[in-house]
Amino acid sequence: MLSLRDTDSVRQLLAPLHRAVAPPDALRVLDALDGARALRLRSVADLYELVKRGLETRVALDTPNYVELLRGVDSEGSNRKWPHERSLQAYVHLRIREILALSEQHRADIIHREVHEAAGADRPDFVLVRVQAVTDPSVSLELPIEVKWSHNSKECVSALTEQLGRRYVVEKNRTHGLYVVGFTGGGKSKMHRDPGLLAAALDADRASFEAEHGVRLGAVMIPCVGSDS
């Protein structure tokens, strides 16, 4: 049976087609080749891998074509200032539904954090993905996702472990979480303006937290750089 790892092999096979025609999406090829059964979710680890891979490939690759949807354009055609992070949350929410639809998880439900859990004093940009396990429909698989703009200099790095890792994974007795950063090229420090430095900082914090708590955190950076960013 084909698995999520087979997407890399499919992409390699399709690579020569790039020069002649637009190749089909690798996840759609897997779906046609019995990938639908392979992509059906049996554990939180399956859900984590599916959503993370979809964000890293489909979403990260084509988001630059849709920056205007996230940022907005004024009456003169110029990009507006970056909106609240809930705009990015809504975009990620929509794209995850697309990823889950490709795996034929039609019973999937995505719930905003303030609806599903007590929000407390703050309302962080949080999406909770819940699907029913294939092996046992009575079991819900939960994957928390924290969303931040890269120019949020105060919390962009620390929220990976302090919000997502500690509050929404460890304290809720979950095992996996995803952190999505919309990279805008702005921010007060060089690290927040350099995707390589920012990715390195996130990876270092992630590795340290995982080693200490025995959980799995993933960080995905989505390029959202506009023409005048």
Image (cartoon, grey):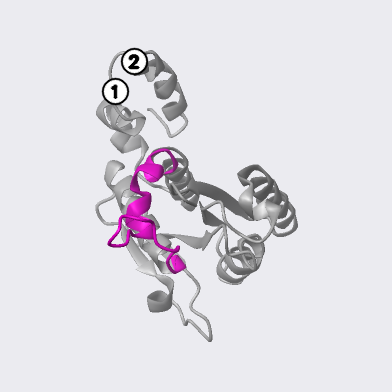
Are the residues tagged 1 and 2 within 8 Å (C-beta)? yes
Taking the spot 42% from the left edge, 32% from the top edge, the residue there is: 3
Q: Residues within 10 Å of mark 1 (few under 14, many from 20)?
A: few
Magenta includes 67?
yes
Near-viewer residue (117 or 68): 68
> Mark 2 = which residue?
17
> Mark 1 = which residue?
22
Q: Label 1 is placed on what type of residue?
A: Ala
Residue 15 image offset from top left, x and y in percent: 40, 18
Near-viewer residue (16 or 217): 16
Taking the spot 46% from the left edge, 26% from the top edge, the residue there is: 8
The answer to whether residue 28 is seen in the rendering is yes
Q: Is residue 121 above or below residue 97?
A: below
- From the viewer's perspective, tell me whether residue 185 is left or right of residue 35: right
Mark linked to residue 159 = none
Q: Which residues are magenta?
A: 60-85
Q: Label 2 is placed on what type of residue?
A: Leu
In which image quadrant can residue 33 be found? top left
Q: Secondary structure at mark 1?
A: loop
Residue 61 image offset from top left, x and y in percent: 42, 38
Magenta includes 81?
yes
The answer to whether residue 131 is seen in the rendering is no
Considering only order in the chain, which callout, 2 or 1, is on the residue closer to the N terminus? 2
Residue 65 image offset from top left, x and y in percent: 35, 43
Taking the spot 60% from the left edge, 52% from the top edge, the residue there is: 216
In which image quadrant can residue 19 be found? top left
Q: Secondary structure at mark 2?
A: helix
